Image (cartoon, rainbow, N blue to C red):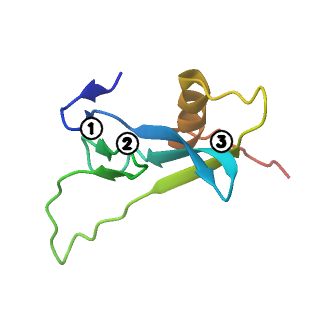
Amino acid sequence: SAKDGKNDVWVDCPWVAGLFTIGGRQVAIQHMSHPDNPQPVSYSTRPYGRFGAFFTADLTPSQPLRLRYRLVVVPMQEGTNVTCERFADVYADFASPIEVRVKV
């Protein structure tokens, strides 16, 4: 659902994922920005592998800014699922984790 905002910037985009080779091994890396972070979030990506989230926010001494991000690194092997659906599910778990209650 992300929109191409020109110059490799993706608007209204809560996460990005890319395939990289690190130390001779291929991995998928997903970067996620939590929905509690200032909105809207845009991601800047570059063909050489740099990516990052950005937003605008007003800062004051009385109202600190708390940010939540998550990185997921997936080692690639034959048959590894790297579909958008997989990464969307991982993001959904980050954005709205299940609630567990222990009854004693």
Query: Which numbered marker is on residue 65?
Result: none
The residue at the point 69 percent across, 53 percent down is 24
Q: Which mark is residue 8?
A: 1
User: Which residue corresponds to mark 3?
Assistant: 99
From the top left corner, tell me how far across and down residue 65 is, in percent.
29, 66
- Mark 3 or mark 2, which has the lower sequence index? 2
**In x, y percent, where is residue 95?**
50, 40
Q: Mark 2 and mark 1 in contact? Answer it, CB < 8 Å.
A: yes
Q: Is residue 62 left or right of residue 65?
A: left
Q: Position of residue 2 (x, y in %)?
A: 32, 26
Above or below, 36 relative to 98: below
Residue 38 versus residue 19 in the image, above or below: below
Name the secondary structure under disc 1: loop
Q: Work out whether residue 68 or residue 74 is closer to the camera in this orientation and state it.
A: 74
Quick check: 40 left or right of 25? left
Is tag 1's residue or tag 3's residue first in the polypeptide sequence?
1
Disc number for residue 47: 2
